[in-house]
Image (cartoon, rainbow, N blue to C red):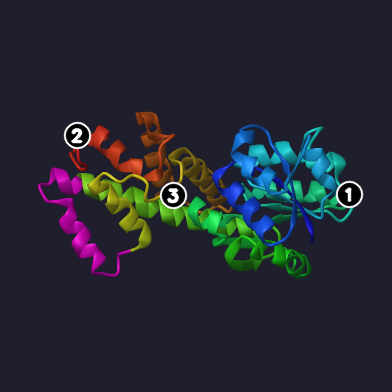
Amino acid sequence: MKHIGIIGASGLMGHGIARNLQRKGFDVSLSIHRNSERVADLLAAGARQVTGPAELGACDAVIICVTGSPQVEQVLSSPQGVLSGARAGLIVIDTSTSEPESTRRLAALCAGRSVTLVDAPLARTPTEAELGKLNTMVGAEQAVFDRIAPVLAAYCENIFHVGGPGAGHVIKLLNNFIGQAICTATAEAFAVGALAGIEPRKLVEVITAGAVNSGLFQAMAKTLDGNFEGIRFELDNARKDLRYYTHLAEEVKVPALVGEAVHQSLVTASALGQGAKYVPALVTAQEKLTGAKITPR
């Protein structure tokens, strides 16, 4: 595991991954779809730009860091995708938040080409990505996990081997469902409180001192001071992740009553024009929806 290919290095998370792999002495090759100016520093530091994903098939491992399953399927299995030029023994690490059903199909397709697909989605933010302190939850056989562990350690502070192939993406969807449930509940509570005549900051004081407190709640509370960057994660990406979660729940025949409510809260916020903003814009969506005055004008 010396030569690592990366797809998605122009993104906020992918850039940090590539940068830390370089710092740890790995040879890095990049397939760049657009925004080549965002990887200029990586190229200046010695990264090699290839003509497309197929050329990365000669690497020891390829890391994919894109939006979701459609993009992963495209860069892997299209006529010019990674698999079209993959050598036998290649390991592909999907760090995206993807649908487990898609991951299973792609893993079987990869296996037919003597390629191993690992799901290793990420947690934390672009800030930790640049610092090499991401969290990852890995779905892989033990022998494969042992091989890629040094690669993961280059950009992750906490590495969790959560099970066999596919388990990483399942855990990530559960994680994101719980996280977005906290965020949507907080935004709704602020709106209800404001319209009921209380000062939302008093709610923050009470929760801060009790068991309900969390980092996500505190990030949402920053909106009361006009700070909407406490969670640097696009709301439409969160909406996509919750859609994947509800699909998963349906697949295993579990009623997703809370999951569907959280998903629809995100859909509503997106319909109200907040989709391209960060998740804390759920508070803005509540203001638009209810007329509550929550944040500074």
Is the residue marked by circle 2 packed among few (<14), some (14-19), or many (20+) residues within 10 Å?
A: few
- Residue 231 image offset from top left, x and y in percent: 40, 50
Q: Which quadrant is the C terminus positioned in? A: top left
Q: Which quadrant is the N terminus positioned in? A: bottom right
The answer for how far apart the CA atoms under marks 3 and 2 are is 25 Å
Labels 1 and 2: the sequence-earlier one: 1
Q: Which residue: 11% across, 51% down?
A: 198
Is the residue marked by circle 3 packed among few (<14), some (14-19), or many (20+) residues within 10 Å?
A: many
Mark 1 element type: loop
Q: Can residue 245 be seen in this view?
A: yes
Which residues are drawn in magenta? 192-213
Instruction: Determine whether 180 is above or below 157 in the image.
Output: above
- Residue 217 image offset from top left, x and y in percent: 32, 57
Residue type beneath disc 3:
Gly
Q: Can residue 97 be seen in this view?
A: no
Labels 1 and 3: the sequence-earlier one: 1
Mark 2 element type: loop
Q: Which residue: 37% across, 29% down?
A: 273
Q: Mark 2 points at which residue?
A: 291
Q: Name the residue under label 1.
A: 87
Q: Which residue: 35% across, 30% down?
A: 272
The answer for how far apart the CA atoms under marks 1 and 2 are is 58 Å
Q: Mark 3 points at which residue?
A: 259
